[in-house]
Image: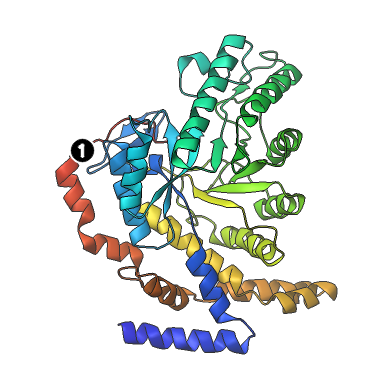
């Protein structure tokens, strides 16, 4: 089997080399790729109709990290785990840090929760009540203290704030509340930390949401300072939105902070990354690679934000990581010189064919080579490798059905 894959790899390497691709550089960049997985992605989750419990789901944040280590083990590119507060609160962050390190992991972005408690039903930073806004700010300062304890560089913010009916709130006054509260939190960050501000067009506010699109997030970030950046969640866009254009625009403006990878069919997330429109994911990575080549995409935070109700949690996370590896690999082999010449000549068909050719390339032998050198078990098929490991069955027996706390959304 490995001999056959090696032959396929050697053939692909020869073809790419003939096309002028620096395969060694591509492989080095693929080995350096890192995608953060979310602690909540390993927890029980559901819909407004209920939580769907699974066998073997983690009962604590420590067990979430155990499962995250499996996603990293079978892909080689997921060594950090985002935490959500208060879902993942522990008595000792020092101990969690040590435990993560023992698994080859580290604590990544810290995600405050200002949407779940009853006090936030009319908003957090956008609330008319000063005491509610103060509570939300205090919570975020506590999260920054956690960042300092674990060495996290990213404070990842999403707000459910909005209204459901005309007249329910004053748009401009709520905007000013947000500016004031964000400024107070931003001032607590140190020079190595970044505030990532996410946006969402609707839900749970169906008349308006306070940070409804990338432009609003960008405006808030610009007013705050250079350590505030826009967080792009692939699911948080209306149908027809050109996400790759948004990514390119934010990169050029120095405002792209990171991603929450997932997939959408309409305008929400939690579908497996690359499961609906892998071509879109590839086109997004095409812009990211172009930014890397120009030296403007070195500090982008790549994170997954998914929590599935029906799939095995670890398997779907591996699926997403493999999709991201594949999209990155294909974007790295685009013939940029040929594409540039076609663009200068207004050769629409020629330019599109260059883009399509890289997407159509079967990069699995290349990824096999990279994963092999990263020491991944079963580098040809990470999902099969995980299934054959017996980990899921062992944890189902050990943990039983239904994990611990956390909304899991």
Q: Badge 1: few (under 14), some or many (20 or more) residues near its Cα, within 10 Å?
A: some
| Res. 340 in view | yes
Q: Is residue 369 left or right of residue 207?
A: left
Judging by the rendered image, the residue that carries numbered circle 1 is 401
Write the residue at 43% across / 56% down: 78
Q: Nearer the viewer, residue 311 or 379?
A: 379
- Compared to residue 213, the image places residue 297 above or below, namely below
Could you say where residue 108 lies in the image, as x and y percent from the top left? 47, 45
Could you say where residue 35 lies in the image, as x and y percent from the top left? 48, 55
Q: Which quadrant would the C terminus be assigned to in this image?
A: top left
Write the residue at 23% across / 44% down: 56
Q: Is residue 247 left or right of residue 320?
A: right
- Compared to residue 342, the image places residue 45 above or below, namely above
- Compared to residue 33, the image places residue 118 above or below, namely above
| Res. 313 in view | no
Quarter of the image where one finds residue 335: bottom right
Could you say where residue 248 lies in the image, as x and y percent from the top left? 71, 55
Q: Which quadrant would the N terminus be assigned to in this image?
A: bottom left
Q: How is the image coloured?
A: rainbow
Could you say where residue 127 lies in the image, as x and y percent from the top left? 61, 15
Write the residue at 60% across / 61% down: 285
Number of callouts in the render? 1
Q: Is residue 255 left or right of residue 263?
A: right
Q: Nearer the viewer, residue 243 or 61?
A: 61
């Amino acid at each position: 089997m490995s001999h056959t894959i090696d032959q396929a790899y050697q053939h692909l390497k020869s073809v790419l080399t003939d096309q002028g691709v620096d395969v060694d550089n591509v492989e080095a960049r693929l080995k350096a790729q890192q995608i953060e997985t979310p602690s909540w992605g390993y927890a029980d989750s559901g819909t407004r109709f209920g939580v769907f419990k699974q066998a073997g789901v983690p009962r604590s944040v420590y067990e979430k990290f155990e499962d995250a280590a499996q996603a990293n083990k079978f892909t080689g590119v997921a060594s950090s785990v985002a935490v959500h507060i208060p879902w993942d609160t522990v008595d000792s962050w020092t101990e969690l840090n040590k435990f993560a390190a023992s698994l080859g992991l580290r604590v990544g972005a810290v995600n405050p929760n200002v949407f779940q408690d009853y006090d936030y039903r009319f908003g957090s930073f956008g609330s008319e009540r000063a005491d509610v806004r103060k509570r939300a700010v205090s919570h975020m300062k506590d999260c920054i203290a956690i960042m300092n304890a674990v060495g996290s560089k990213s404070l990842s913010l999403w707000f459910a704030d909005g209204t459901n009916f005309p007249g329910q709130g004053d748009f401009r006054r709520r905007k000013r509340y947000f500016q004031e509260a964000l400024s107070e939190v931003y001032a607590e960050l140190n020079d190595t930390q970044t505030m990532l501000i996410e946006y969402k067009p609707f839900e749970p506010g169906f008349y308006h949401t306070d940070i409804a699109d990338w432009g609003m997030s960008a405006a808030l970030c610009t007013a705050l300072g250079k350590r505030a950046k826009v967080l792009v969640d692939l699911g948080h866009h209306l149908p027809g939105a050109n996400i790759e254009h948004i990514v390119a625009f934010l990169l050029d403006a120095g405002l792209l902070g990171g991603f929450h990878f997932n997939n959408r069919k309409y305008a929400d997330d939690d579908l497996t990354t690359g499961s609906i429109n892998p071509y879109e994911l590839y086109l997004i990575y095409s812009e990211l690679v172009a930014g890397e080549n120009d030296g403007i995409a070195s500090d982008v935070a790549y994170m997954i934000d998914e929590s599935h109700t029906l799939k095995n949690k670890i398997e779907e996370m591996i699926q997403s990581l493999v999709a991201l590896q594949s999209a990155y690999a294909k974007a790295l082999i685009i013939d940029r010189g040929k594409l540039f010449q076609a663009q200068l000549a207004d050769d629409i068909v020629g330019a599109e064919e260059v883009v399509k050719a890289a997407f159509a390339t079967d990069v699995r032998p290349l990824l096999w080579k990279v994963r092999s050198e990263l020491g991944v078990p079963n580098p040809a098929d990470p999902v099969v490798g995980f299934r054959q490991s017996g980990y899921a069955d062992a944890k189902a027996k050990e943990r039983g059905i239904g994990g611990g706390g956390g909304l899991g959304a």
